[in-house]
Amino acid sequence: MDAESQALFAEMLDRYNRDHYDASQWSEYGLSPQGYAPAQWSEMQTMGWFELLRPDDGRAAAPIADLLPLYASAGEALWREPIGNVFAESVAVIAAMDDSERRRELLAGLISGEWPLAYAHREPGDGWSDAIATTATKTAAGYTLDGRKTMVIGDAACAAFLVSAIDLEMQAPALFLVEARAQGLGAQRYRTLDDLVAADLSFSHTPAERLCSGSPAIQRANARGAILAAAESLGIMRGANRDSTEYLRERKQFGQALLGFQALQHRLVEMHMRQHECEALVASVAEAFDDQAPDLDRQLLALRVQVSRALRHITREAVQLHGGMGVTQALRIGRYYKRALMLDSLHGTADWALEALSELQ
């Protein structure tokens, strides 16, 4: 997608957000057992956005750069729909499979919206590492899994799970498909800090289908998820900066709009500068991902440091600039801050990324 097409796509997404998201809908979605509105999810499937996953030019996967406007809009409007089950890690896992009818079948299921897949890789106490304790045992009928996974977002909307496990026969990581209704699969659901629905999964001799070898596919899947989370963070930054500017323009003190006070102007400038720095970095790392750059691991960690720090700074400043209103349910600001904390929980804090960066040779 060229720059002009991306701009038009972003404009269309802005219109969609204005028509479909406001404070009343946040409350409505929060009451639903799935944590989102199924009717709105169905409408998204008919908008043609899922076609962005269709690869061309012989690629195994479409460019991730085309998805940046979509995820930025999701962050700005605080979408609750489980778009990660369609656009994020699952695509990288499918692309890592051998070119076969099964790979094409799974990708077609994502594009149609009829077969969303949830990525289940993290385990209790893993500290954002790739340590895997879940095991896969080969049987006459295929494989069975035993173990636990945590923080699987949007599991209620998925048709199956993509699960990382140690293949005991090969003594190496691999990725497996487990259907949502498989025997021996348990799910303990709960609300996250940002009021989404997640689940901790347990596997006890659970039937599974082996899809591909693990380590390279897991690295690509985690990288894809991290880049799209950074794009979502850009949307949160943009929304927090916009709302803060409008609030300071409307509120008055001593007969003057708060926006007229130089000290507050300086804080807003700092917030906007951090946003624009991250915009350039996200675009650069997305391009490196699509080109399979050799130093992608280093770029991803640098991206995590920069985006995590900027997002925490901007949302924290936005809450302070709004005063007591910043933590009320009527405004987006408090929700932006909670989502920022949740993204750190899912993809790693700046401190964690800095430590990992220092360990790279």
Image (tube, rainbow, N blue to C red):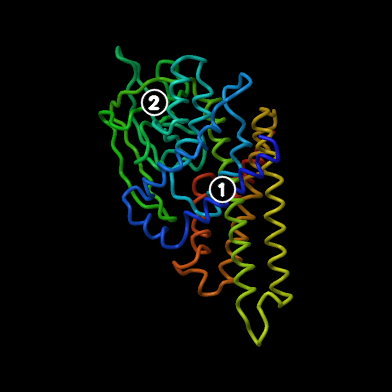
- Estimate the x, y position of residue 302 in percent, counting from the top left: 67, 43
Amino acid carrying label 1: it is: Leu
- Estimate the x, y position of residue 226 in percent, counting from the top left: 57, 40
Asked if the residues shown at circle 1 and circle 2 are in contact, with their CB atoms under 8 angstroms apart, the answer is no
Which quarter of the picture shows residue 158? top left
Image height of 156 relative to 137, above or below = below
Q: Which residue is mark 1?
A: 13
**Visible residue check, residue 174:** yes
Amino acid carrying label 2: it is: Leu
Q: Is residue 258 left or right of residue 166?
A: right
Q: Nearer the viewer, residue 122 or 158?
A: 158
Q: Which residue is mark 2?
A: 177
Mark 2 element type: strand
The C terminus, quarter of image: top right
Q: Nearer the viewer, residue 101 or 277?
A: 101
- Estimate the x, y position of residue 341 in percent, counting from the top left: 51, 55
